[in-house]
Amino acid sequence: MTDPRRAVHVDVGGTRASNPLRRLPPMTLRRRIVGSVAALSALGLLGAGGAALVVERHRIEQRVERLLAQEVAEFRELAVTGVDPSTGRPFATADRLLEISMQRNVPDDNEVHLGFLPDVTLVPADGLGSLDTDGAFRELVTRHTQPTFGEVDVEGQGRVTYAALPVTKAGQVSHYVAVYFTDRELGELADTIRSYALAALVAWAGLVFAAWVLAGRILHPVRELQDTASSISASDLSRRIDVTGGDELAALGRTFNGMLDRLQEVLGSQRRMLDDAGHELRTPITVIRGHLEVMDAEDVDDVEAVRALALDELDRMSGLVEDLIVLAKTRLPEFLATEPIDVGNLVRRTLDKAQALGNRTWEVDAAPSVVAVVDPRRITQALLQLAANAVTATRVGDVVAIGCAPTPNGVQIWVRDSGPGVPPEDRQHIFDRWHRGDDHVDGEGGTGLGLAIVRAIATAHGGTAWVTAAGPSGGARFVIELPEGDLATEEDDDAGEDRTGDDRGAETAEAVPHEGPRGREEPAYVSLESLLDEQSQASTR
């Protein structure tokens, strides 16, 4: 037996029945806008028409009652103060009173006056309808003994409103009746409402069409934004949106174009960096592979030489990777941890650390107490990198100096050396990635990323970096200028020492050069504590 709870329903065509709502076109923003406009305008037109109908019906009903009351009042005045034109005396009989009243009063449209005598009915010559011959209506109105207003449905006439006034003359009771055909009056209003409905329908259709066109024009930048976003790929970020005007959509387009500009810049920079990094890493890998392939495993000296060469190349690769990581982090918000720092004190402490880089004549050009809001760890890293470059460009005993000074726009920090200097044609590109100068005394350069890191650190602080000649006799002066911020110069250096004494511990893991396995100086990325330990052990030995 088949469990009915587990029965599978299959349609005749062999496909599962689909929800009909899923076949409906998607509710796009344009459809939602036009649908909202259509619904609101339809509600507005219907509300206006309905309100007009209710108000106009009430007005017609009040007008009918007012006119009937006016007819009764005029008849009463004629009965009390009027005279018979033929006798010049008050009316003696009801029929004469009713006859003169009908002659003098001209009824409005959809109105008729009737006079019901005991044995006859008086009607105007142009009276409407056939109420004078309707026995039921005659019986209804002639039974009243007091002035009365009322409504009644009459076959063939619809709803009528009447006012009946009894008249007693010569011992006989007659009735003056003013009648309004209410449904006929409201029928004219219905014709007006139908005309309004037709006009409103045409106006509504025109409004919906205009809203559809206008929504399409308004949302055109959004569609262009969608098309542009759909056409963008990692290999092509060149498309942009044509922006005109100054409204919110134009601002959105400009923001989107700016985002594309930034993405194109970042992705292009990453692509170039990856290409260059692949090229730079390929060289040490090839060197290591080549030496390993020809190495004589039985020859201890050959093994040791290849091992030293492999470690040397791995150090270069490690430095390159560390430099790339630093450059990648420079655009992140958490790259800097700024705080108020005495820059003069920072310069003196950095000089103490830099003396381990090489046997040079280390000097302080100037170190006034200048308090600036910077990241001391990153500024120290940049100064040590410049100092390491100065060491590679100078010889034993040459001068390498570090200094700082306040400027009208902020503060300048520099590293000066007495080496050969930087040619003017190289100064514009020396801070570019992978740029290597030819001023190294040992003939070998670093990774080509050191000065790029220096400039990235300066840029992260909102500043700049550049190089000039150190003086008429040559040399180079690398300058980092930080913008004006919370700066203050003080004459008392001890105050600066007190404020920044706790900063010493924050600078114990900087990128500094050390001697490689072959005895030459080149950038490698080790902690400052490790370097100082090596120097201490060498002194002990």
Image (cartoon, rainbow, N blue to C red):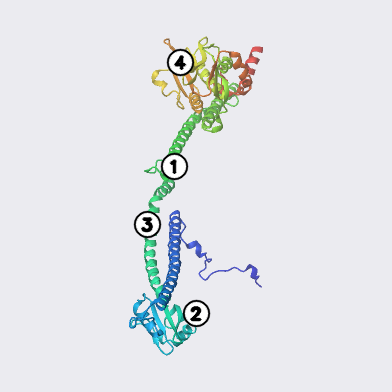
Q: Nearer the viewer, mark 3 or mark 4?
A: 3
Contact check, label 3 and label 2, Cβ < 8 Å: no
Q: Is residue 80 above or below residue 361?
A: below
Q: Nearer the viewer, mark 3 or mark 2?
A: 2
Q: Is residue 262 above or below residue 479?
A: below
- Give the number of callouts: 4
Disc 3 crowd, CA 10 A, few/some/many (<14, 14-19, 20+) = few
Residue at 53% in and 28% down: 323
Name the secondary structure under disc 3: helix
How far, Cα to Cα, is label 3 from label 1? Answer: 29 Å
For the C terminus, the image quarter is top right
Tell me residue 333's x, y (percent).
54, 33
Tell me residue 192's x, y (percent).
38, 69
Residue at 47% in and 13% down: 419
Q: Which residue is mark 2?
A: 146
Q: Nearer the viewer, residue 343 or 510?
A: 343
Q: Quadrant of residue 156?
A: bottom left
Contact check, label 3 and label 4, Cβ < 8 Å: no
For the N terminus, the image quarter is bottom right
Q: Which residue is mark 1?
A: 256
Q: Which residue is mark 3?
A: 210
Q: Earlier in the sequence, mark 1 or mark 4?
A: 1
How far, Cα to Cα, is label 2 from label 4? Answer: 124 Å
Contact check, label 2 and label 4, Cβ < 8 Å: no
Contact check, label 3 and label 1, Cβ < 8 Å: no
Mark 4: amino acid? Ala
Q: Quadrant of residue 90?
A: bottom left
Name the secondary structure under disc 4: strand
